[in-house]
Each structure stands twice: as C-alpha cells, then as structure tokens.
Image: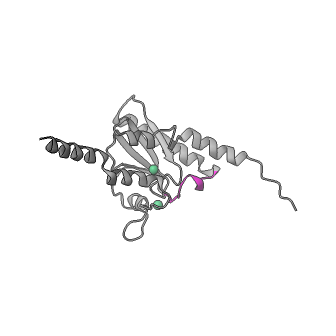
Amino acid sequence: MYRYKWNELLAVCSSMIRPKRILEKLKILSPSKNQTYDENGICIFCRYAQTGERIIYEDELVAAFVDRKTIAKDYLQIIPKRHIKNIYDLSPQDIPLLLHMWDTGQRLLQDRHPNQKYIFGFHVPPRNSIDHLHMHCIVPPIKSFFGKIVHSNYFWLMSPEDLLFKIQHESTRKPRKIKI
Ligand SMILES: [Zn+2]
Ligand SMILES: [Zn+2]
C-alpha cells in the first residue's frame, strides 16, 4: 500500500516538474534559438504579411494576427510589413511607424475587449523568439507564472513608451569625440 502511494506521488511530482516543458520555455532566454525562418528559409512574419496567412488586420504599414500562445485572455502581435529585425534596427525615422503599431494595437484590443487593462511591449534581443520586430498586445490575466514574468513590462518586455524614449534619446545623444 505504501509502495503504491510512493509511486503515485512520484508520478504526480514528475508530471508537475515536466522538465522538457520547462526547457522549452527557457529557450526564449537563450540567444541561440532561431524560430524566424520556415522550412523554405523565409521569415515567417514576412510570409504572414505577404500572404495574409493568419492576418486579422492590415493596412499599408502594419499587420496583426492572434498569437498561437493561449496564455492570456487575448494575445495579438502587431508587425511592420517591412522586415525590421529587432528594436536595435530602429532609428528616429521609425517613430511614426512605432506610434502607428501602438495605436493599431490599442484600437484592436479596445474593439475585442473594451475598457480593460492592456499590456504592450517588445522583447529585447536576445530575449526575442523571432527576428522580425513585433509588438506583443496582451489582455490580462496571463495564466502561467512563467508567462507573467516573460510578459511583464518590469522584467522582460520593453514598453512602447520606453522604446520611444530610447530611440529619441539615442538620436539626441552627442556623437563621441574621436581622438586623433
Ligand atoms: Zn520578416
Ligand atoms: Zn516577442
């Protein structure tokens, strides 16, 4: 009887720990992962934008689709149609594009879930899973503990405000003097 219970306890513990699942989730922390390209070597977000695959909204500059992860009440991604690798490839000229992405995300979430708290943000490389700029647009609550950490503006997700500040700030930074 005790032995049976012990085995049962072990089974419960191992199903709770699920090391494979944890390793999968930790991949986002590793710079080596690359989920950007499909089997034909095409950026999957460029493919969505060009073919309309999964797209729920588009205009001349941006496209939006529902994230495959079902960790929140609602979860959209807004992408620029142009292939911009990540936040480090943004310059002050992209500020109108960023504002448009942010505005589009707010309008879409407002339509789908009016008057709620929303989370918007960009993963900072190497903590991004796809090398095509995308803005996470989330309606809480986020269900998993790990999801909460990875999608929190405090730890892992740079908010649009902070990103705009960063781009503006870097553009106004004085060039370093070069010693000859
Ligand atoms: Zn792309
Ligand atoms: Zn991301």
Lateral position of residue 145 relative to residue 5, left or right? right
Most foreground residue, 165 or 47: 165
**Magenta run includes residue 86:** yes
Q: Nearer the viewer, residue 149 or 43?
A: 149
Q: Is residue 95 magenta?
A: no
Q: Is residue 163 left or right of residue 156?
A: right
- Is 157 left, or right, of 77 in this rendering? right
Q: Residue at x 44, y 53 (%)?
A: 28
Q: Residue at x 31, y 44 (%)?
A: 70
Which of 110 and 168 lies nearest the eye of the viewer?
168
Q: Residue furthest right?
A: 180
Relative to residue 38, is residue 81 depicted above or below? above
Give percent across and percent down for residue 43.
43, 63
Quadrant of the rendering where the C terminus is positioned: bottom right
The answer to whether residue 108 shows anywhere in this view is no
Percent position of residue 11, x then y: 22, 47
- Name which quarter of the figure residue 147 lies in: top left
Q: Residue at x 45, y 57 (%)?
A: 130
Q: Is residue 30 above or below residue 3?
A: below
**Is residue 169 at least partly visible in the picture?**
yes
Q: Residue furthest bottom?
A: 40
Q: Position of residue 131 (x, y in %)?
A: 48, 58
Count of numbered circles in the view: 0
Residue extending farthest to the front is 2
> Among all residues in the image, which is located at the extreme left?
1
Classified by dominant secondary structure, the portion drawn in magenta counts as loop
Vertical comparison of 116 with 59: above or below: above
Q: Which residues are magenta?
A: 82-91
Residue 101 in the image: x percent, y percent? 49, 45
Q: Residue at x 39, y 42 (%)?
A: 146
Q: Nearer the viewer, residue 43 or 151?
A: 151
